[in-house]
C-alpha cells in the first residue's frame, strides 16, 4: 500500500470550499492508502498569535475530521506540535537550504510584495513542511495547487541531503494534485476563502447558514426572465449538493424563466442543510466529549512519533551528531 501524508493548518471554521476541495478527497484517499494526516499547528503560529484562538482551531479541525468519518485506527491523525522531531529536523535542514530558495517561496514573496512584514517563521515555513513530509517517507503528498512549490522544495531538500550525507530519504515524495476538484465559489463569486470573508461555514447554526446562502451574489435578472445556469454561483454550488435529476430540473427552471434566484437559493439551502444535518448532530455529540478527541490525537501522536524518532536516529547518524 502506498503511503500518503498531508497537513492542514488549523486556521478557522470549516467552509464548503475546504470540505469539497480538501477534506472530502483526503478522507477518500485515506481508505486506499496508508495515511498520515497532520494538524499543522506549528505552521499556524506564523499567523495566529492568540492561545485561545489556536487551541479552539485545533479542536475544531480535529472534530471536523472525526465527524466526517476519519478512522483513527487506519489514519495516523496527529498534531504537528506533539512530535518535536519536526522542529529538530528543521534546524538540520536549515543548514543545507540556501537563502535564495526560501526567498523564492510564494508564501514569503506574496507577503513581501504586499508590503507586509514577514516573520522568520514564515520565511522558513517551507523547511518545516519538508520535515513534516520527509520524517514519514510518504510516496505522495496530496495538496492544493498553491502548495505544489513546497512539495517541490521538499524533493530538492531530500535529494540534497542524500547527496551530502547519504541516503537518509530513500523515497522522494511526489505532490498529488487533484485536478478535478474545481474551485468552489464563495458568496461573492470569487474563490471561497476565509481571507475574502465570503465563506459558507458548514457548522454555523441553521439560521446563519440560510442567511449566507440567501446572500449569494447573482446578476440582476428578475424572476420572470430566463437565466444562464453556467453563469450563476447558486447553480455552481448546487452542483455539489443536487442529484443529477434535481440538477436537470433546476437547469430547466433557470432556462424557462418564472423561477427567481430567491427560489433557487431556498432550494439550495434545503439541500445543503439536509446534507450536513446528520454531521452537525454527530459533531455536537463528539464536542461533548473533549477527552475522547484528546485521546485520539495522543494515540496518533504516539504512532507518528515512533516513525519520526526512527527517522531522526538515521539522520543524526548520517550528519554525525
Ligand atoms: P482558506 O482559503 O479559506 O484560508 P485554506 O487555505 O485553509 O482555506 O485551505 C485549506 C484547503 O482547502 C486547501 O487544500 C485548499 O486547496 C482547499 N480549499 C480552500 N478553499 C477552497 C475552494 N474555494 N475551493 C476548493 N478548495 C478549496
Ligand atoms: N502548508 C500547508 C498548507 O498551508 C499545510 C501543511 C503543513 C502541509 N505541513 C504539510 C501539507 C505537509 C502537506 C504536507 O496548506
Image (tube, grey):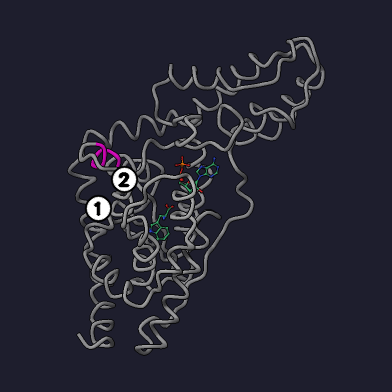
- Position of residue 11 measured from the top left corner of the image (x, y, whole percent): 36, 42
Query: What kind of element bears circle 1?
Result: helix
Q: Is mark 1 within 8 Å of ligand 2?
A: no
220 sits left or right of 116 in the view: right
Q: Give the Cα separation between the discs numbered 1 and 2.
A: 8 Å
Query: What kind of element bears circle 2?
Result: helix
Question: Which quadrant: the C terminus?
Answer: bottom left
* Residue under the point 52% across and 65% down: 175
Q: Which mark is residue 62?
A: 2
**Residue bearing the label numbered 1:** 297
Q: Is mark 2 within 8 Å of ligand 1?
A: no
Q: Using the image as rendered, state which of residue 93 and residue 277 is in the foreground.
A: 93
Q: Using the image as rendered, state which of residue 153 and residue 225 is in the foreground.
A: 153
Among the 4 quarters of the image, the one containing residue 206: top left
- Tag count: 2
Q: Which residues are magenta?
A: 53-57
Q: Is residue 90 magenta?
A: no
Quadrant hosting ligand 2: bottom left
* Relative height, residue 73 to residue 57 (above, below): below
Amino acid at each position: 500500500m502506498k503511503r500518503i501524508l498531508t497537513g492542514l493548518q488549523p486556521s478557522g471554521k470549516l467552509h464548503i470550499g475546504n470540505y469539497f476541495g480538501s477534506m472530502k478527497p483526503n478522507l477518500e484517499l485515506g481508505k486506499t492508502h496508508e495515511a498520515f494526516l497532520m494538524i499543522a499547528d506549528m505552521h499556524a503560529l506564523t499567523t495566529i498569535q492568540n492561545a485561545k484562538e489556536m487551541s479552539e482551531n485545533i479542536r475544531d479541525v480535529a472534530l471536523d475530521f472525526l465527524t466526517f468519518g476519519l478512522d483513527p485506527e487506519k489514519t495516523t491523525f496527529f498534531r504537528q506540535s506533539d512530535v518535536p522531531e519536526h522542529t529538530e529536523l528543521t534546524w538540520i535542514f536549515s543548514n543545507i537550504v540556501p537563502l535564495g530558495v526560501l526567498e523564492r517561496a510564494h508564501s514569503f514573496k506574496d507577503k513581501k510584495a504586499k508590503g507586509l512584514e514577514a516573520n522568520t517563521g514564515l520565511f522558513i515555513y517551507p523547511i518545516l513542511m519538508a520535515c513534516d513530509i520527509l520524517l514519514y517517507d510518504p510516496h505522495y503528498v496530496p495538496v492544493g495547487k498553491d502548495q505544489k512549490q513546497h512539495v517541490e522544495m521538499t524533493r530538492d531538500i531530500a535529494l540534497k541531503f542524500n547527496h551530502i550525507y547519504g541516503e537518509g530519504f530513500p523515497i522522494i515524495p511526489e505532490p498529488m494534485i487533484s485536478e478535478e476538484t474545481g474551485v468552489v465559489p464563495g458568496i461573492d463569486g470569487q474563490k471561497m476563502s476565509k481571507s475574502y470573508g465570503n465563506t459558507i461555514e458548514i457548522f454555523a447554526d441553521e439560521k446563519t447558514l440560510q442567511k449566507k446562502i440567501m446572500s449569494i451574489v447573482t446578476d440582476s435578472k428578475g424572476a420572470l426572465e430566463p437565466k444562464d445556469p453556467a453563469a450563476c454561483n447558486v447553480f455552481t454550488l448546487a452542483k455539489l449538493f443536487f442529484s443529477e435529476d434535481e440538477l436537470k430540473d433546476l437547469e430547466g427552471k433557470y432556462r424557462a424563466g418564472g423561477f427567481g434566484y430567491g427560489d433557487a437559493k431556498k432550494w439550495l439551502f434545503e439541500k445543503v442543510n439536509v446534507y450536513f444535518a446528520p454531521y452537525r448532530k454527530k459533531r455536537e455529540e463528539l464536542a461533548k466529549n473533549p477527552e475522547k478527541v484528546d485521546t485520539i490525537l495522543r494515540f496518533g501522536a504516539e504512532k507518528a512519533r515512533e516513525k519520526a524518532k526512527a527517522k531522526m536516529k538515521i539522520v543524526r547518524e548520517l550528519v554525525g551528531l
